[in-house]
Image: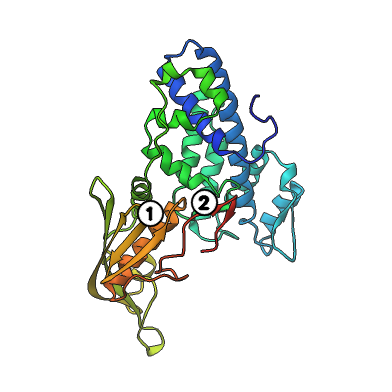
Amino acid sequence: MRLRTIVEDISRNDFFDFYTLLYAYQERNSPNHKQIEAELKFIVAYIVKDHLNQLGNMLLNRVPDTEHEESMAVFHQYGLEIDEETSETIGMEKLSVQDKAAILAKILSFNHEHGFTGKTWFGLAKTFIELVRVPADLNSQILVVDKIYNLLHHGGQITDYMDESNWIEDALNYRDNANPAQIFAKASSRVRALIGRASYTGMDSTPVADIPKIYTALRRAANKRSGVNIEHDGNNKITITVQFRDLFSNQNGEKFRMPMPAFGGVIPQRFAERPDLFEMGELHIGQISIEDRGNVLMVTGGGAEVPIPKPVNRQLHLAQDLIWVAKGVGSGYAPTKGSGIANIKDNYYHIDGRRVKM
């Protein structure tokens, strides 16, 4: 049976079908190359349409400033309204991806950031418009999918807003650590039959271990943070080292420590512009490790050990918590279980499409 023709949530099978077809298409080893190309075109269009629609909806829910008349005029021009109780945008389901890009382009042309919840969304709106305008040829659209999935890994936790949030994070980290035969094993039986096992040098059902996926997530989480070092021993252990300075506020004649540290001793730009109000304290170094011990993942540091039950499919959330836990160790706090930003949660797993409370 062919893929759904009505765009609904993308499934894990759709995701791995795409990467299986892409590999076979690029390698050109299968006698069914024309059919593979046709199927790849279909699934690429399917994924791009779904994900761009979702991104467009996210942005349209974060753009409007009801006090900004020009923005509201654009919304009304396209039949959009704002729900007074929820502040959500109503009428988006009637719009095409191109309509959503046109609305955002007009609002961005006003040269303001009205309604955006931070610069992440403002920058994402620009990226969204660029992606919608990418040429429709197959190779260009493949790059759009890749660009979207790179966006899903970075600032703002875009995956949390996706319909596919219960599995996409784990699938992306699996993809980055799997060999082609492991990707092939995750594809649907229909796609595997189309390509042929011989064209894919066999099928490898061995799963990707937790530690490599967590290491991938840690490198992404630490990507733009100075003073954060991630080391993988090549086996079952990762060490996270964080260097930072406490950031103090001197406002209103009182000095108090702020919750946001200066990672790597680099004061955030918004604070650096007011040296009379903010200052940095002494350098701290915190270090923890996470190790696969068979039945559990063990976090060690500050004289304590905290187990994390398997399976883990929220690797990026875990990675961000680990960086903050290492920072806590540098401040003299041992790792503990809890719901706070510098604690290890009870688990990092989605169940049946519903996110486990963290």
Kind of residue sitting beneath label 2: Ile
Name the residue: 38% across, 20% down. 201
> Which color scheme does this rendered protein use?
rainbow
Indicate the position of residue 92 as horizontal and vertical percent values. 71, 47
Amino acid tagged 1: Asn
State the count of labels.
Answer: 2
Query: Horizontal placement of 223 versus 24: left or right?
Result: left
Reply above or below: 87 against 220.
below
Q: Which residue is mark 1?
A: 295
Q: Is residue 107 visible?
A: no
- Disc 2 element: helix
Question: Is 85 drawn above or below residue 31 in the view shown?
Answer: below
Point 58% across, 28% down: residue: 43
Q: Residues within 10 Å of mark 1 (few under 14, many from 20)?
A: few
- Mark 2, residues whose alpha carbon is within 10 Å: few (<14), some, or many (≥20)? many
Q: Relative to the observer, which residue lies in front, 139 or 219?
A: 219
Q: Secondary structure at mark 1?
A: loop
* Distance between mark 1 and mark 2 Cα atoms: 30 Å
Mark 2 or mark 1, which is nearer the start of the sequence?
A: 2
The picture places residue 220, in percent across and down from the top left corner, at 37, 50
169 vs 278, left or right, is right
Mark 2 highlights which residue? 158
